[in-house]
Amino acid sequence: MAREEGAGAGSVLLAFILGAAAGAAVALLFAPASGKDTREYLSEKARESRDKAVEAARDARDVATETARQARDKATDAARQARDAINRQRESLSTAIERGRQAFREARDEENA
């Protein structure tokens, strides 16, 4: 699931960057503004694109961090449950061994009596 979300975020980021580049190219070709105005406009759009890319990367990192945290929590819970099950089995086995010993002693005592 994390791979799907990461790939989706990467695809969105790539599409955004390609769209920004295509938009900049079209703006240069059809801009009725002066060169200075066009450069300022492109600089502004480049900053906006960078900010959006940084935000998208931050969001992707947050999703990955949350996914990792959830996986860690699930693994911790599974380990705790396994440890509890082993302890219960150990107690059952100890009880069974003790009962077997007691039965052996009683049978031996009856034989000797």
Image: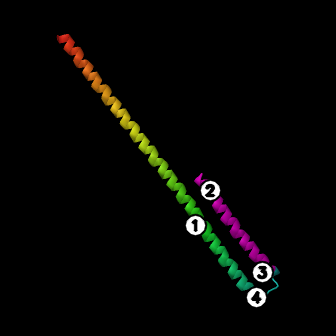
Of the two numbered discs 1 and 2 on the same chain, state the one appearing first in sequence: 2
Please state if 80 lies on the left or on the right of 37 as rendered.
Answer: left
- Label 1 belongs to which residue? 58
Q: Quadrant of residue 55?
A: bottom right
Please state if 54 lies on the left or on the right of 94 as rendered.
Answer: right
Of the two numbered discs 3 and 4 on the same chain, state the one appearing first in sequence: 3
Q: Tag 3's secondary structure?
A: helix
What's the amino acid at mark 1? Arg
At a point 39% along the width and 39% down the height, the residue shown is 84
- Over which residues does the magenta segment extend? 1-29
- Label 4 belongs to which residue? 35
What's the amino acid at mark 4? Gly
At a point 51% along the width and 51% down the height, the residue shown is 71
Real-space Cα distance between discs 1 and 3?
30 Å
Real-space Cα distance between discs 3 and 4?
9 Å
Q: Which mark is residue 28?
A: 3
Query: In this rendering, which labeled residue sits more in front, label 1 or label 4?
Result: 1
Of the two numbered discs 3 and 2 on the same chain, state the one appearing first in sequence: 2
Reply above or below: 71 against 34.
above
- Label 2 belongs to which residue? 5
Residue 93 spot, x, y in % from top left: 33, 29
Of the two numbered discs 2 and 4 on the same chain, state the one appearing first in sequence: 2
